[in-house]
Image (cartoon, rainbow, N blue to C red):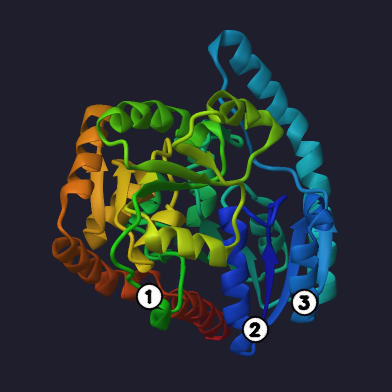
């Protein structure tokens, strides 16, 4: 079996990229042949190049054109959006032709489009009569405030004509009107191996944010709320581990002199594991998290979560009972008070129960097995 993965990533620190690498590693260990059609922007990533080289995976760099744009506002905005939809056809056609060349050369058994913001994999798969898997890792409109090309309804129609759709959560499946579809499967990301779960006690006196510093992650709002919290809880710090871009550097500059708020920059998986396992709690304030990889990772690393009641964050906390959800910042303040006042035995007990559930939902083994079973069923039905 050979699978061609079609990916849009421009950086090796993006969540969808990390999940892809986990999946590809699993498939290679199972003897599956892999090829990757990637965004040209990823050419500069040494980590990606080294990974593919280590597994002898052929890479094809394409000029990828995303099937989303900023949400239009007002009459002028809607007119400009219509113009963009028409002009985008030319770029999308070029992208599809380039991908089709890759398919003709590699002759994969399955094309796996790694995110919903790419559409050309679907069309190229249809042209070549190859089963297509569409991996929905984001809402697109709710989380990133984007409009879907050409419309959300048209995209939903395409999804239902794909051979298989993998939704990251039940809520994403519902969002794209696939709850009743037999081709749509919910497969949570694998964030750790079953034997790698850990619980370290006692906890250190800090709260952790582990995400890139950007508007949709709601970090500025949490900092302001934490400043209020700190007035009555001076022993606690707020640590922020995430990539700092030039676009959002102003957030760092604004609070860099606040002694109890510490920007750590990007951290690798091992460093994050240490930070999570020692934190009092992880805070997730994303506008609308597709999955909430850090939420699942925190629970697997023995750290309870305080998360906004929406998207994947809400779903993970509810399924595992691995923390507290909040709807507004008054509730958020109450959640922080709850976690610092919980005794060590109760914290320990709550984590162990949530980890038991997380082991079956978010393990790399469960993730890989579920995707591989989808592949096998597709090829079996294709032969029948």
Q: Position of residue 184 (x, y in %)?
A: 42, 62
Which residue corresponds to the image point at 21% horizontal and 58% vertical from the top-left? 321
What residue do we see at 50% from left, 34% from top?
216
**C-alpha distance separating marks 3 and 1:** 30 Å
The image shows residue 122 at horizontal and vertical percentages of: 64, 57
Residue lying furthest bottom: 31
Q: Element under label 3? A: loop
> Which circle's residue, 3 or 2, is located before the other in the chain?
2
Where is residue 89? Give x, y as percent. Answer: 75, 37
Question: What numbered label is drawn on residue 197?
Answer: 1
Name the secondary structure under disc 1.
loop
Residue drawn at point x = 39 percent, y = 32 percent: 222
Identify the disc placed on residue 57. Answer: 3
**Neighbour class for label 1 at 10 Å: few (<14), some, many (≥20)?**
many
Q: Is residue 194 left or right of residue 161?
A: left
Tell me the mark number nearer the camera, choosing from 1 and 2. 1
Q: Quadrant of residue 252?
A: top right
Q: Are marks 3 and 2 in contact (CB under 8 Å)?
A: yes
Q: Is residue 177 visible?
A: no
In front: 45, or 187? Answer: 45
Give the mark, 1 or 2, whose residue is nearer the N terminus: 2
């Amino acid at each position: 079996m050979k699978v061609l993965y079609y990916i849009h990533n421009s950086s090796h620190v993006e969540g969808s990229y990390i999940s892809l690498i986990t999946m590809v590693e699993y498939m290679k260990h199972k003897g599956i042949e892999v090829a990757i059609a990637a965004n040209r922007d990823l050419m500069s990533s040494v980590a990606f190049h080294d990974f593919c080289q280590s597994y002898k995976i052929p890479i094809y760099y394409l000029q990828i054109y995303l099937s989303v744009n900023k949400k239009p506002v007002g009459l002028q905005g809607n007119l400009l959006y219509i113009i963009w939809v028409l002009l985008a056809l030319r770029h999308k056609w070029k992208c599809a032709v380039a991908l089709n060349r890759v398919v003709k050369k590699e002759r994969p058994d399955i094309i796996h489009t790694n995110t919903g913001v790419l559409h050309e994999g679907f069309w190229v798969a249809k042209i070549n009569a190859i089963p297509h898997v569409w991996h929905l890792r984001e809402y697109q409109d709710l989380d990133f405030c984007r409009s879907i090309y050409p419309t959300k309804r048209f995209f939903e129609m395409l999804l239902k004509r794909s051979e298989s759709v993998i939704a990251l959560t039940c809520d994403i499946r519902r969002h794209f009107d696939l709850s009743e579809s037999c081709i749509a499967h919910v497969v949570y990301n694998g964030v750790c191996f079953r034997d790698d779960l850990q619980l370290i006690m006692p906890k250190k006196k800090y709260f952790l944010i582990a995400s890139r510093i950007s508007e949709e992650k709601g970090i500025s709002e949490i900092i302001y709320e934490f400043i209020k919290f700190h007035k009555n809880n001076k022993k606690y710090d707020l640590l922020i581990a995430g990539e700092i871009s030039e676009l959002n550097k102003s957030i760092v500059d604004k609070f860099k002199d606040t002694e109890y708020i510490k920007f750590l920059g990007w951290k690798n998986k091992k460093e994050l594991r240490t930070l999570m396992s020692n934190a009092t709690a992880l805070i997730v304030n994303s506008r609308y998290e597709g999955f909430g990889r850090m939420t699942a990772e925190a629970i697997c690393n023995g750290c309870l979560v305080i998360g906004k009641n929406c998207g994947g964050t809400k779903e993970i906390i509810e399924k595992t009972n691995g923390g507290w959800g909040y709807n507004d910042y008054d509730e958020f303040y109450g959640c922080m008070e709850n976690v610092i006042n919980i005794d060590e035995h109760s914290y320990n007990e709550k984590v162990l129960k949530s980890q038991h559930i997380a082991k079956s939902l978010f393990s790399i083994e469960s993730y890989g097995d579920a995707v591989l079973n989808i592949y096998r069923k597709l090829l079996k039905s294709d032969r029948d």
